[in-house]
Image (cartoon, rainbow, N blue to C red):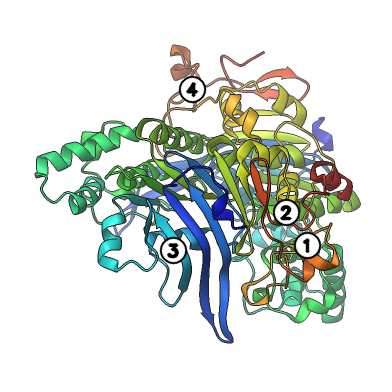
Amino acid sequence: MKIGDMTAIPEPLLEVRDLRIAIPGRQGEHLAVANIGFTVASGEILGLVGESGSGKSLSMLAVMGLLPAGMRASGSIRFKGQEILGLPERQMRRLRGGRIAMIFQDPMTALNPVLTLGAQIVETIELHNPSLSSRELRNRAIELMELVAIPAPDKRFDQYPHEFSGGMRQRIVIAIAVANDPDLLIADEPTTALDVTIQAQIVDILNRLRREKGVAIALITHDLGLVAGLADRIAILYAGRIAECGEIGAVFQRPRHPYTAGLLAAVPSIDADVARLYAIRGTPPSLADRPPGCQFNPRCPFALPRCAEYNPEFRRFGETVVACHRAEELNLASDTADAR
Amino acid sequence: MPAEDALLKVEGVHVEFPILKGLVFPRRVGSISAVAGVSIEVAPGETLSLVGESGCGKSTLARAILRLVTASAGQVLFKGVDLTKLSPAKMRPFRRHVQLVFQNPYASLHPRMTAREIIAEPLRMLGMDRREQVERAKQAMQRVQLRPEFGDRYPFAFSGGQRQRIGIARALSVNPEMVVLDEPVSALDVSVQADVLNLLKDLQADLGIAYLFIAHNLAVVRHFSDRVAVMYLGKIVETAPRDRLFKRPAHPYTEALLSAAPMPDPIRERKRQRIVLRGEIPSPANRPTGCCFRTRCPKAAAICAQIDPPPVTLAQGHVVNCHFANA
């Protein structure tokens, strides 16, 4: 069974299937993304969670057609039913910044320091709407700045990035991303570089974009708290594969994959005491040194011999899909506590 | 906590950085007060956390304590000796008692020194002979659960969590009484963070080290600290024992911070009421009059612009600077 077959929605906005991304290395290619599939429905927020090197950012760069030179992607990425993996650059460019847009992690480097913020927003609108007059462009840019709650936008329009704080720059990055009313917004760690109180403001803006504009969001993050507050569904990635994917409440309440359960137990809570945090032993495998079988087996407290032999198929449990050989027998909520 | 017991006592410390203008003949046109009159105490063996957002001065305060920047006013008393008055030569013996672990284990280890050389460097600075350096470095590695035979490897051969262990071993090699931990886990992956936090707690239990823990992740702070001091724009706005601070925050800023901290629980995360603060932290070059938080405070009134709120003690060890603190 493939993970892409799982959703009940007839035609998802974005459908990624059997995605593989190979990085050339000295001793042949390494599969940074070994097999990833997921869907995003219109107006839905999907959280893609994983540690560094899990392949979450690469997968979304592949969706944007922005993989670094030398990397090869295979499989299928369909956007509104159209295959976009391997689309010629000319056509891809029409989608990018138009129907599909992206917010980057670091607002300090995502903006051009020598252009005014207004000019950078206008540039994106103009690229996809060449017939607009400069007055129309300016008005549209100011509307966007209002949408992301920038105070005094007509004054701010002519300012440069260095005159803005990190939180304000991230709002401009979001304004640029939604300039052409995209159907899908890819947000790569949109709040990681920001402070807690500013994070809360950005979360509000993302929620409002979904509510008022019906934008679907693929939210890439390692912050389980952020996903818990925003996403409808969550996909947990580990070493280039999907470990578990499902409705957010179901996954948090009853994790089926030992890695998911481990992650949830490893995070301290703001309102509960634990004497000792649960630590997943070992470290994620390096790209050149991926284990056979289930990628998590060397670190898994529940691993059996077969886990190191072959990779588990996806199996469905109600609202979630899991790749674990022992998914039905384990009761992870209590078993993880015992392993502590 | 009575003052005699304090290992570290910081009193009214100010740190100012000049704002210079002119390329050829720079002249001072103003100053930024990064730390504006901070007093804290750390007892032997306890963990005090300094919490605040970027730019609040928490790292600068730590650097002033270690004399990596110069305090422009105030005292830093370590076991009763004022470190701010010591000459660099007299300061050196104190350095072994107060060590520092940096945030980013990818940047804070010299790439061309082996793990053993990195860990032994503070010992070399103390003038210890080579054989003893090697022996002590080996002990420090065992203490942080790194295999001593990896001592000949260079930092690139270690994972992020292992590198942070090297940073911790370096701090521990001189048997300090206090370690300043500047965001020690925020650059690490979630599954590795837990491991490093557990290690730090074990070391404290075994060796009785005091920690000054600088962090912005409140869940980690709650797990890790005995007492918490909340910093905003160069000032401490609230100090309290851990449980008290998380159960009954008295300062509106602390309340907002707690309400904004994301919780990994979809049901409660969606139900709870967030206090979303308006605006951003003002520039420390241009501090608001009166209370430093008033420009973003939901409770601000006329008095807040006029009078900087004095510290009020609400309970044993719970001190807050606010005209309208929650009782």
Residue under circle 3? A62
Q: What chain does mark 1 sit on?
A: A
Residue under circle 4? B297
Q: Helix, strand or loop at disc 2?
A: helix
Q: In the displayed structure, does residue A7 sit left or right of residue B2? A: left
| Amino acid on which disc 3 is placed | Ala
| Amino acid on which disc 1 is placed | Arg
| Amino acid on which disc 2 is placed | Tyr
Along the polypeptide, which appears first: circle 3 or circle 2? Answer: 3
Q: CA distance from mark 1 to mark 3?
A: 29 Å
| Mark toward the viewer: 1 or 3 | 3
Q: Marks 1 and 2: CB-CB under 8 Å?
A: yes
Q: Helix, strand or loop at disc 3?
A: helix
Residue under circle 1? A299
Along the polypeptide, which appears first: circle 1 or circle 3? Answer: 3
Could you tell me residue A319's position as x and y percent? 64, 41
Q: A158 and B91: which one is in front?
A: A158
Residue B297 visible in the shown view:
yes
Q: What chain does mark 4 sit on?
A: B
**Residue shown at the point (56%, 70%) measured from the top left:** A32
Q: Residues within 10 Å of mark 3 (few under 14, many from 20)?
A: many
Could you tell me residue A224's position as x and y percent? 62, 44
| Mark toward the viewer: 4 or 3 | 3
Q: What chain does mark 3 sit on?
A: A
